[in-house]
Image (spheres, helix red, strand yellow):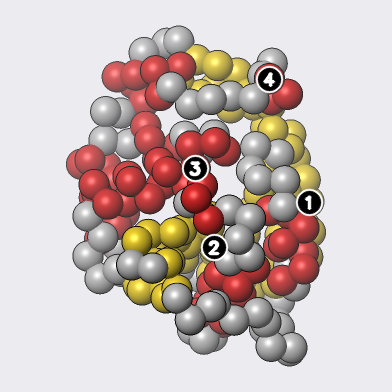
């Protein structure tokens, strides 16, 4: 389903998007993932599995852009060798993921990052973020970028700053989120 096929009913959403960058790897060791969790890079992430990850992690945070892509539009992104999806597993089940995007090198972008609702608040976020940062820097980029917004979890920006990212700028964006997606839009974000 492409954006054009969703229809004209949209919910205008106002968010402040903060763009961040890290210009060198962290010097101090970061938190480690507990023994009962592991991170695996998918070798051939299927559209269905990606939709599960993206949809579950991003449901409460108005992650909508990739939901508007058809399978035919999403599949080439997932097959692009410049994009990698890394899945956090806790006790054998998916607990979160992050996506690294190398298409705009020499900078590497942490395009998506988040936890499944059932593990939020259990102390895995900072350790997974550090694992993502270390994975990115292992590839030798000039820098690592990420952005977050006021629709994301309230701890997202503080966690990025604690991990060593620096704010570049914050801009107000108005999103036209298709109502048909059925996402819960917090009142504080609605125009």
Q: Is residue 167 left or right of residue 60?
A: right
Answer with mark 4 or mark 3, whichever residue precedes in sequence: 3
What label does residue 110 carry, if any? 2
The relative height of residue 88 versus residue 51 in the rendered view (above or below) is below
Disc 2, SS: strand
Q: Residue under label 3, please give it.
A: 58
In which image quadrant can residue 93 be found? bottom left
- Spatial CA span between label 3 and label 2: 15 Å
Q: Residue furthest top?
A: 9
Of callouts 1 and 3, the N-terminal one = 3
Q: Is residue 125 left or right of residue 191?
A: left
1 vs 4, front mark: 4
**What secondary structure is found at the residue carrying circle 1?**
strand
Say what secondary structure mark 4 lies in: helix
| Count of numbered tags | 4
In the rendered image, which quarter is residue 44 located in? Answer: bottom left
Observer-nearest of 22 and 114: 114
* Residue 169, disc: 1
Q: Are marks 3 and 2 in contact (CB under 8 Å)?
A: no
């Amino acid at each position: 389903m492409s954006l054009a096929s969703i229809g004209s009913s949209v919910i205008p959403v106002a968010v402040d998007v903060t763009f961040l960058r890290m210009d060198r790897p962290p010097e101090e060791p970061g938190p480690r993932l507990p023994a009962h969790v592991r991170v695996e890079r998918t070798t051939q992430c299927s559209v269905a599995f990606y939709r599960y990850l993206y949809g579950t992690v991003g449901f409460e945070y108005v992650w909508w852009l990739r939901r508007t892509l058809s399978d035919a539009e999403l599949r080439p992104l997932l097959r692009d060798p410049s994009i990698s999806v890394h899945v956090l597993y806790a006790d054998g089940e998916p607990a979160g993921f992050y996506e690294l995007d190398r298409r705009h090198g020499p900078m590497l972008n942490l395009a998506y990052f988040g936890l499944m609702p059932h593990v939020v608040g259990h102390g895995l976020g900072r350790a997974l973020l550090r694992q993502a940062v270390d994975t990115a820097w292992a590839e030798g980029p000039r820098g690592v970028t990420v952005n977050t917004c006021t629709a994301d979890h309230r701890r997202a920006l503080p966690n990025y700053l604690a991990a060593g990212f620096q704010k570049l700028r914050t801009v107000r964006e108005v999103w036209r989120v298709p109502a048909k997606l059925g996402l819960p839009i917090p009142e504080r974000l609605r125009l």
